[in-house]
Image (tube, helix red, strand yellow):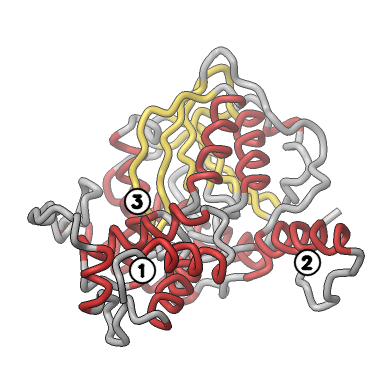
Amino acid sequence: MPLADAADIVREVAGAVGLAEGEPGVRAVLTALSRLEPISIRGLSRTVELPVPIVASICGELRKRRVVAAERPAQLTSTGRRLFASGSLTLDRSVTCPACAGRGFAVPSHLRPIATALKRIAWAAPPPVLELDQCHCTVETKIRRVVALHEADALVGRRMLLLGDDDLTSVAIRHFVERFGSEQTVMELVVVDLDPAILGFVHEELHGAPFPFRCIQRDLRKPLPSGLRHVFDTVVTDPPYTVPAARLFLSRAAEGLGRSGDVFFSFGSRRPEAAFHVQRAILEAGFAIRRLVRDFNDYVGAGALGGTSHLYHLTATSALRPVVTGRHEGPLYTADVTSHSRSSVWRVAGSSPSSSARSSPTVP
């Protein structure tokens, strides 16, 4: 196979996959693969910031063209190396702490009793509702989140609002406060969620907590109730990983905060275009990004996300305002957004979407 065929292969694979990023996306996968091989598809996904299914499809097409070997983890064939690795640099990989995976925090031994308790609770929690884009984070992530809140001075003496809590972050906060704090550690904690099963479970696990708490069922397509507006110091949220959901939950966070405060916002899209729109929404809502920790959150079974999402620590500025005012009427969850996007294409083509497309439930 002549060297000139490399450009043709990249073009063919981009077309076969239907990659929104086009040929640069395929080249990014090939460059990362030549530098890091052998590497898992999930590892490639994290490196190039593309969803796991997309990276898997690219590698599948490259296997058909004998560029990627049939063996796993993913690696180039001799032909693939000749075509795509000849210009790469030979450098040692950067060494990261195996315990913290570059996050800057590993669960220390004195927190293991909390980890044990949270693991037991997580096993008893209601299963994730896929239609609501629920995907539970790991016990280690729950602990990292509370430590991050504490280290940012966003926990002690704060009124806290959790917009959605299928990850049971509120329960982790309770266990930390009981072990290391006092009755004055958290002034108030409020959990707002659409899922009644999650709310019932959280309410039971918070019963007897050393701080006042409330659990409120609410469809966040609607604005926050007046009693929850402009009264909180810290907001924690891990919304569905769509741009409309990011804009909506950031807006509800802006509604909940007082004149100042912090938001701990997790978002997992691996497409640079989505990250751009989310970060623009952050700025439009009047937040400044104090810190961004890549791959901070680990999830159980979140294959399309590469199993992780980033954590944004945001601070309110004087320009704080909700980007979405009133009720959100458009698509929100992944199935909604995907179906809406396909519907637009089908309407242009003069046909109709399949009736099998999933839609998310709503609460009036």
Cα separation, mark 3 vs mark 2, equals 29 Å
Number of numbered markers: 3
Given the current orientation, which residue lies at the most extreme top position?
318
Residue that appears at 27% across and 79% down = 73
Cα separation, mark 3 vs mark 1, equals 15 Å
Given the current orientation, which residue lies at the most extreme right position?
350
Instruction: Identify residue type, mark 2.
Output: Ser
Residue 303 appears anywhere in the view = no
Tell me, for residue 296, which label it has, or none: 3
Q: Is residue 52 left or right of residue 127?
A: left
| Secondary structure beneath label 3 | strand
Q: Earlier in the sequence, mark 1 or mark 2?
A: 1
Residue that appears at 41% across and 54% down = 49
Residue topped by disc 2: 359
In the picture, residue 141 is in which quadrant?
A: bottom left
Relative image position of residue 357 (x, y in whole percent) = 78, 72
Q: Nearer the viewer, mark 1 or mark 2?
A: 1
Instruction: Identify residue type, mark 3.
Output: Phe
In the picture, residue 59 is in which quadrant?
A: bottom left
Q: Is residue 326 above or below residue 50?
A: above
In the picture, residue 68 is in which quadrant?
A: bottom left
Q: Is residue 243 left or right of residue 235?
A: right
Relative image position of residue 321 (x, y in whole percent) = 65, 22
